[in-house]
Image (tube, grey):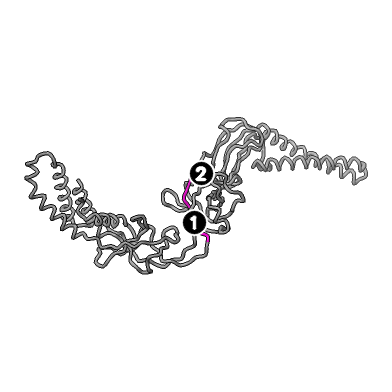
Amino acid sequence: MSRLLSIMLLCVMATYASQIPVAKSELRSFSQSVGTNAKVIQLSDAQQSIMSLLSGHIEHYFVQVGQNVKSGDKIARIDSIALSQMSSEYLSLTSQLKDLENNYRATKDLYDQGLISTRELNIQTMQRSAMRSSKETLKSQLATLGIDASKLTKATSSYILKAHSSGKVAQILQPLHSVVNENSAIVNIIQNRAFYIKAYLPLKYASNIKIGQKLVAFREDKSQIITHVSRVLPELDETTQRIVVLSAIDSKYDNLYLNEYLKATLFFSNATEHVAVKKSALSFFNNEWVVFTPLDGADVVEHNEHEGHGCADDLPKKDLDHRSHKVDRAIEHDNHDGHNHDEHDEHDEHDEHDEHAGHDEHQDEEVLFDIRVVELVVEDEEFVAVRGLEAGERYVSDKSYYVKSMMLKSSLGGHGH
């Protein structure tokens, strides 16, 4: 079986040897950083409750949980007896005030002719002012409910509750057709861009943290959330005994979930230049971080971000068929081991031939890569600064696990025994 695995490994290596991408190490600017755990939160003042302004009965909801709304969008229609009374009183005051204005003008004419006393005129003046005040009060209350009193022609009991700001409906607090009181919370809305990343940092970094520093959070789908520190809380987290840092999310991100746990990196120093390689180039080999560098003659592909690195389909079909045939033969041989001694003898000569073929193939698949032990200095979202490489040196920028497999196979002698 070990011989079979060796042959199969040779096939895999042969398939991918010409596809290993190579790039050149380069000088890049890095800020000192620290990795940390974080989660998505929302501050209490970022959530808004839309209140019922009158007691009444919820007739209809215009929104659903999770729906985005803008300021002024309809939330619910409420039927209220109190509104019916207010609108009816407003119409009544409008009619009474019209009659009172006519009476006042007639009284004023009589006063000007000296036919009535000042006292009688003052009584009418005060009555007119009080009625005007009552009407304006009702007009203002109706306006708060979104009702234009000047357009009222009859009493109404129905009013529309509207959103006061943009956001997403987080919760509908009252069931449809339920009776609510004045100032009852109807719907909770999470305001847009109200999410924060809450990160936990060791106390030793207390003097390094400053408002405005960049913090990058990494999601499970490999996407990144760019934030900047907005607050450093004055108390340590009781559970972790770490500094709590809040960073504001700069842009709108879809599908953010409260209490979503993330990995994050905080960058907190001035930029300095270091020799850098892609993170995908790093491999842990013999308990050390290493980067593989191609020797002269290694069959590699210079890395180009705008071009693909090729695939197994790029190999000539006859080569793939040849390797597949070798694997099939190895499997067939392995399945017959121990079943029939005579049959085994019958294949001795054939197996001996395969051993020489495997040895020759190992020679053809000579590993042409060097192992360079590196020291990690600092990292950003895509690159890591290292000591152990010079700027401009070629290195395996991706698929380093293929090279590592070749190295391990080579260290075992290449025969799988």
Q: Give the quadrant of residue 107.
A: top right
Percent position (x, y) of residue 271?
A: 49, 65
| Residue nearest the observer in this picture, 301 or 306 | 301
Viewer can see residue 303: no
Q: Which residue is mark 2?
A: 259
Q: Secondary structure at mark 2?
A: loop
Where is the N terminus found, in terms of image quarters? top left
Is residue 381 shown to the viewer in this render? yes
**Residue 223: in magenta span:** no
Q: Position of residue 9 (x, y in %)?
A: 23, 52
Q: Position of residue 241 (x, y in %)?
A: 56, 48
Q: Give me the disc on residue 206.
A: none
Magenta span covers which residues?
259-268
Of residues 257 and 295, the one nearer the viewer is 295
Q: What residue sits right under mark 1 in the picture?
A: 34
Mark 1 lies on a secondary structure that is: strand
Residue kind at label 2, given as amino acid type = Asn
Q: Amino acid at mark 1?
A: Val
Q: Is residue 267 left or right of residue 409?
A: right
Q: Residue 289 falls in which quadrant of the image?
A: bottom left
Mark 1 surroundings within 10 Å by alpha-carbon count, few (fewer than 14), some (14 through 19), many (20 or more): some
Left or right of 235 on screen, residue 37: left
